[in-house]
Amino acid sequence: MSTLGGLYRELLAAFRTAALPTPELDARWLVAGATGLPATAITLSPDGPVTVEAAEKARSFQARRLQGEPVDRILGHREFWSLEFRLGPATLSPRPDTETIVETCLSLLPDREAAYRLLDLGTGTGAILIALLHERPRASGIGIDQAADALTVAGLNATDNGVADRADFRLGNWMEGLEDEVDLIVSNPPYIPSADIAGLEPEVREHDPLLALDGGLDGLDAYRLIAADAPRLLRSGGLLVFELGIGQEEAVAGLMRRAGFEMLGPARRDLGGVPRALAGRWPGNPRPA
């Protein structure tokens, strides 16, 4: 019978031989996922027995990882904002960089007891909206996505994280057909130029949904649509917050200014120093028809 430590070392050796970038972490999380034990058990109880079924599951995870599938896709879930999120084929895996968006939105919505109304465009797993609702317990919001399968996952995540009664997930094309007046619109839109898709890392190119990656010829298609239409739904003083791709701050800020937004300083940087969260305020007048 395998032991926790032995199974971990088996996966670790395979991942090191394959020159994976984070072999220790990958082996640890996949063994934990296969056995249903916390990752700390590998260190605390390395001689603990592992059932034949769990060992086979870990080795199947190993094979998938060696074929380039990301760990979070294999496990089917990922932590974001200290919350657990299910993943699906139609969703991106929420990244630590995107926590910068949540931080920015919360700083602009400082009243924990206010009944803010939020709109998350391209919601995917629902991670941004759910994290915001978790931190603002009287807020409510709508999450829009073009993929019905993504909305199913988002609904499950809202239930898992205790905010389902305040989250409304709808199928749609950005703001088309919406009439709800909101205090904040937030979006992590597809922003990779179409010609760059083929050059992405295989883990992204082969496992993330193209709909959530491809931002058109220059990567700015979604930003143009959202910036132009957002004033129609924003209350006076309402906020628009975008996640940015690398090098997009100037272009996206220009789109927001042309739509009438007052920019709220430079983009907030993520932990890697990349300008990631760009915010603007709708002054209120003149309001679009």
Image (cartoon, helix red, strand yellow):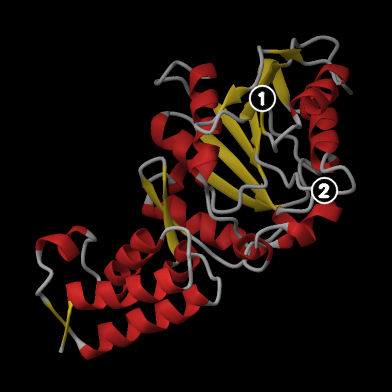
Q: Quadrant of the C terminus?
A: top right
Q: In the image, what residue type sits under mark 2?
A: Pro
Q: Is label 1 or label 2 in front?
A: 2
Q: Nearer the viewer, residue 146 or 243?
A: 243
With 88 as the anchor, is 61 left or right in this view?
Answer: left
Assign a secondary structure to mark 2: loop
State if disc 2 and disc 1 touch (CB < 8 Å).
no
Q: In the image, what residue type sits under mark 1?
A: Leu
Image location (x, y in percent) of residue 62? 41, 77
Assign a secondary structure to mark 1: strand
**Dot 2 alpha-carbon crowd within 10 angstroms: few under 14, some 14 to 19, many 20 or more:** some
Q: Which mark is residue 193?
A: 2
**As displayed, is residue 210 above or below residue 177?**
below
Residue 67 is drawn in which quadrant?
A: bottom right
Q: Residue at x 80, y 41 (%)?
A: 222
Image location (x, y in percent) of residue 149? 62, 65
Q: Which mark is residue 278?
A: 1
Q: Tell me, yes or no, if residue 129 can be seen here.
A: no
